[in-house]
Amino acid sequence: MRDDLNSFYFFYFLAKMNSGKYVFAQIVEFLPQRQFDLIVDKYKGNRYVKHYTCWNQLLCMMFGQLSHRESLSDLVLCIDAHKTKSYHLGLGRNISKNNLAKANENRNCEIYAEYAYLLISQARKECVSSDIELAVQGNVYAFDSTVIDLCLKVFWWAKFRKSKGAIKIHTLFDVKTNIPCFVYITEASLHDVNAMDELKYESGSYYVMDKAYVDYSRLFKIQKENAYFVTRAKVNFRFRIIKVNKAYPKDNILLDQTISLSGATTQKKYPKMLRRIIYNDIETETTLVFLTNNFDLSAKEVALLYKYRWRVELFFKWIKQHLKVLTFWGTSTNAVKTQIYIAIITYVSVAIIKSRLHCKRSNYEILQILSLSLLDKTPLKELINTEQQDEQNENQYGQLKLF
């Protein structure tokens, strides 16, 4: 009788453990597969494919991003160790290093780029940052680029300098949602201002850029689209003072001027008036000179707008530390771009999960939890919403008190 009871409990707990879905399978449920299939059909990505489809490739690469795999061999070894779970994870059959490498090299990276923009569109509707101090009607975008170094002997096509290879990721970052809304991958030798030609400006929106993007003909394009820009002035730029506006030293505003550019060529590139603001940054003990075409915001609000440019820098730092965009699982241009776009898909997916499950944790914390729980069967909402224990409660029973 006792043996029968033990057998009953054994099979009961076994059934209990196997009920529910793996955490990674729960994450996949947040991805619109039907829209992905339409994009694949558009680019004929599954032509001549029997088993290992573009969807399987996407999920394998996302599994590698979330589990922090160091290489393609590492990823395939990890998947192969759990091959009995591949079907339930959606990873597909015939997963090998050769198959995955060929898929990354040959399948059009635009499939994953277009799917990334689809998820970005969804995320921007759902994710709203609550820590914005500035109340402006239009969207606020920060535009910048980051360089990723590559070995020139392996990535021969990414020549940057004589003995160095690199690529650039140009990113337009939506400050209000903390979502990258435009990603443009180029050779590192491309100057930053050339990436501005790929942008489509929204009327009434604000574009915040560093002084590397000061090109007056391109800035005037923003003016003609009835949008606004905030950037830093170069040291040697020439101008003529039209009007001196009221400054507010209490707000660290040293000077507020209405100016026009001097010089025949420069004035022809930007024939309208500009606003020049000198701001004293107490935190860094530096004096910053801003240029903008907006005359409605206060000088303090313009300075605060430029402060939000650092969010795109934090985004670059975040993906470099927590996703695989520094070491690549393929050497061709297509393989590198595919991996970067799938890293963006992973980042946006985490943001969507955070929003829909009303999680208060940071993206970093969610990613760390997921990396150790992909093969668990804990409900995802319960997993990432578990409240952290307060440090004061750790000693509520008087344990480990030495004095």
Image (spheres, rainbow, N blue to C red):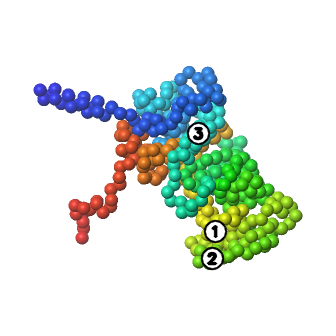
Determine whether label 2 and label 3 are within 8 Å by CB: no
Residue 211 x/y as whole percent: 71, 62
Residue 162 x/y as whole percent: 74, 51
In which quadrant of the rendered view does residue 327 lie?
top right
The 10 Å Cα crowd at callout 3, few under 14, some 14 to 19, many 20 or more, is: some
Q: Which residue is mark 3?
A: 118
| Residue sitting at the far bottom | 249
Q: Is residue 351 left or right of residue 118?
A: left
Three-letter residue code for mark 2:
Tyr
Three-letter residue code for mark 3:
Leu
Three-letter residue code for mark 1:
Ser
In the foreground, 167 or 132 = 132
Q: Nearer the viewer, mark 3 or mark 1?
A: 1
Residue at x 44%, y 32% (from the top left corner): 89
In which quadrant of the rendered view does residue 376 lie?
top left
Q: Which residue is mark 2?
A: 248
Q: Which residue is mark 1?
A: 298
- For the residue labelled by badge 3, is the local secondary structure a helix, a strand or a loop? helix
Determine whether label 3 and label 1 are within 8 Å by CB: no
